[in-house]
Image (spheres, helix red, strand yellow):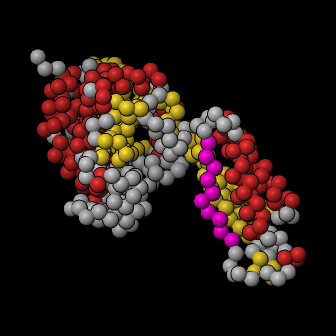
């Protein structure tokens, strides 16, 4: 006798063309973070068609679909993001982006289509559900401060017992699922340092306070924060991405601008690095008789997968895809604002392999030719169904 999950999987297979069509439509009509108004309308229309209760405008352009089962029980939240990136689509495909300079280069179109497919199919099996499924469609994952924070501040997780998220991965083969408990993605902070010196003629440096020299000393000193101030057993990155100063070869610059990012897992390390950066800037500018200001932005927290829920999902997906399909989710210094959800509720975040033999699926995320094997969307749907079944069937 077939199980309910097998019946649902049959339905997912049957509806796969719909999911592919939705993904390709979204790929053709991408919208940037905090600007995803038409995408949100598209999602809301689909959820309404599926017979779900829809709440829109949560924390901005975020929205949810609410599927109540035949009996009361736990509430399980599943999340997908739907914003795009400021990248020109360079693929030669029929579903190439129609919005110049904007592209779904990270798979968010796929995440959204897969969660819509999950909602569509589970809505047809609501009599089997003992509880509630909350389908969270989150805006602005790509741009700090991100959409998750604002959705949580507007109580999107009220009544939720567990929360789960999935992300396509072009560096993982199709059919593989990557999971891991504990810290798996880093906290991300951004800093901007503005140095004010005293400009002058290049031939008379003694009459100036050279902002280039002061900035260079700061950059050099910042390279020592991780190597000499942080415990070698702790992970951290300090990267300088911008150094702007000067207007001509024979003029000593009066100002300099430095921008960089900090990546950490532990809050104690995060706090220490900020303190070190502020001390280095203060010390170098005072010594050089310059002045400064720092804009230090705390971005997304580190993503910390809960152990019990991660182990449960690994077991569930091992039963679904086979033990050989489950691999370790390697910790990385990239960031993901799903971390905010996991700071509020138990759950886990996992990655779903999306590359096949074709080189067109091998490009990294945020690349202008990024694409993926759409069969990975079915694997996201099956994963979500197994999670819902575990809690609510």
Toward the left, the furthest residue is 1
196 in the magenta segment = no
- Asked whether, in this view, residue 383 is left or right of residue 34, the answer is left
In the image, residue 151 sits, relative to residue 158, either above or below, namely: below
Span colored in magenta: 236-245
Whether residue 86 is visible to the viewer of this picture, yes or no, is yes
Toward the top, the furthest residue is 1
Location of the N terminus by quadrant is: top left
Q: Quadrant of residue 308?
A: top left
Location of the C terminus by quadrant is: top left
Q: How many marks?
A: 0
Toward the right, the furthest residue is 206
Q: Which is nearer the eye, 364 or 188?
A: 364
Q: Quadrant of residue 253?
A: bottom right
- Asked whether, in this view, residue 14 is left or right of residue 113, the answer is left
State the predominant SS element of the stretch in magenta: strand
Whether residue 46 is visible to the viewer of this picture, yes or no, is no
Residue at (71, 52) in percent of width and height: 222
Return the x and y of residue 164 as percentages of the image width and height: 39, 32
Residue at (72, 57) in percent of width and height: 220
- Asked whether, in this view, residue 240 is left or right of residue 311, the answer is right
Return the x and y of residue 186 as percentages of the image width and height: 54, 41
Residue at (60, 39) in percent of width and height: 235
Residue at (77, 77) in percent of width and height: 252
In the image, residue 270 sits, relative to residue 294, either above or below, namely: above
In the image, residue 102 sits, relative to residue 227, either above or below, namely: below
Q: Quadrant of residue 16?
A: top left
Return the x and y of residue 350 as percentages of the image width and height: 39, 35
């Amino acid at each position: 006798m077939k199980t309910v999950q097998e019946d649902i999987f049959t339905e997912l297979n049957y509806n796969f063309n719909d999911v592919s069509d939705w993904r390709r439509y979204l790929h053709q009509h991408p919208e940037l973070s905090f600007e995803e108004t038409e995408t949100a309308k598209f999602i809301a229309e689909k959820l309404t068609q599926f017979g779900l209760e829809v709440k829109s405008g949560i924390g901005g352009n975020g929205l949810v679909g609410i599927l109540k089962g035949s009996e009361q029980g736990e509430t399980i939240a599943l999340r997908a993001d739907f914003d795009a990136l400021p990248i020109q689509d360079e693929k030669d495909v029929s579903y190439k982006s129609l919005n110049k300079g904007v592209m779904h280069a990270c798979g968010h179109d796929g995440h959204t289509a897969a969660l819509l497919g999950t909602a569509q199919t589970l809505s047809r099996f609501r009599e089997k559900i003992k509880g509630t499924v909350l389908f969270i469609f989150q805006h602005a994952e790509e741009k700090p401060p991100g959409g998750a924070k604002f959705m949580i501040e507007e109580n999107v997780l009220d009544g939720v017992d567990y929360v789960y998220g999935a992300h396509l991965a072009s560096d993982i083969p199709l059919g593989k699922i990557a999971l891991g408990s504990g810290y798996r993605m880093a906290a991300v902070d951004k800093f901007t340092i503005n140095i004010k010196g005293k400009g002058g003629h290049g031939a008379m440096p003694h009459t100036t306070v050279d902002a280039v020299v002061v900035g260079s000393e700061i950059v050099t000193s910042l390279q020592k924060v991780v190597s000499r101030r942080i415990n070698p057993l702790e992970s951290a990155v300090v990267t300088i991405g911008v150094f702007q100063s000067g207007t001509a070869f024979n003029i000593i610059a009066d100002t300099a601008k430095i921008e960089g990012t900090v990546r950490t897992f532990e809050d104690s390390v995060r706090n220490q690095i900020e303190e070190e950066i502020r001390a280095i800037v203060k010390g170098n500018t005072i010594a050089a008789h310059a002045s400064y200001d720092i804009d230090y932005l705390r971005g997304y927290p580190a993503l910390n997968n809960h152990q019990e829920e991660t182990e449960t999902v690994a077991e569930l997906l091992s039963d679904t895809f086979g033990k050989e399909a489950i691999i370790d989710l390697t910790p990385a210094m990239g960031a993901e604002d799903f971390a905010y959800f996991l700071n509020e509720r138990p759950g886990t975040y996992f990655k779903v392999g999306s590359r096949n033999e074709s080189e067109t699926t091998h490009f990294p995320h945020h690349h202008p030719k990024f694409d993926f094997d759409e069969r990975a969307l079915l694997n996201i749907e099956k994963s979500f169904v197994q999670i819902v079944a575990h809690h609510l069937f």
